[in-house]
Amino acid sequence: VQLQASGGGLVQAGGSLRLSCAASGRNFSYYKMGWFRRAPGKEREFVAAIFYRGGDTEYADAVKGRFTISRDYAGKTGYLQMNSLNPEDTAVYYCAVKKGLSTPYMNWGQGTQVTVSS
């Protein structure tokens, strides 16, 4: 199974973007889907996650109240709605999944570039 993030682009500060994370392959299931980002010169950091069962969500403090993670009913596509973007949100955004509580995130796909201009 491969994941593909899309929906990035160039947006002005205060604007919005909606990222998608699509899974290819059959029988795709997971414990948790997460979004991460890597800004130039920085380590990759956690952004948000959603549990497959129940749909509970988790957010990094830096994006709480501005970003919303969701998934479609089948759970094969995840979304990250990003509002009130600021230049600090500029990064390559990636999605990945955890198969279980103690497993690492995997199935990293190519990310999508988000650039926020001031």
Image (cartoon, rainbow, N blue to C red):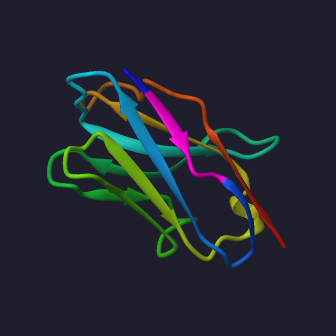
Instruction: Specify the quadrant of the image occupied by residue 85.
Output: bottom right
- Identify which residue is drawn at 74% across, 46% down: 39
- Identify which residue is drawn at 48% across, 64% down: 81
- Residue 42 relative to residue 28: left or right: right
Horizontal and vertical percent for residue 60? 49, 59
Q: Which residues are magenta?
A: 3-8
Magenta span dominant secondary structure: strand
Horizontal and vertical percent for residue 62? 58, 65
- Identify which residue is drawn at 52% across, 73% down: 66
Give 65 or 78, whichever is nearer the viewer: 78
Q: Quadrant of the C terminus?
A: bottom right
88 above or below 66?
above
- Residue 20 relative to residue 9: left or right: left
- Residue 34 relative to residue 100: left or right: right
- Identify which residue is drawn at 27% across, 52% down: 72
47 above or below 107?
below
Q: How many marks?
A: 0
Horizontal and vertical percent for residue 1? 36, 20
81 above or below 71?
below
Horizontal and vertical percent for residue 55? 22, 55
Residue lying furthest left: 54
Give 31 or 19, whichever is nearer the viewer: 19
Determine if the magenta segment contains residue 98: no
- Residue 72 relative to residue 6: left or right: left
Determine if the magenta segment contains residue 6: yes
54 above or below 32?
below
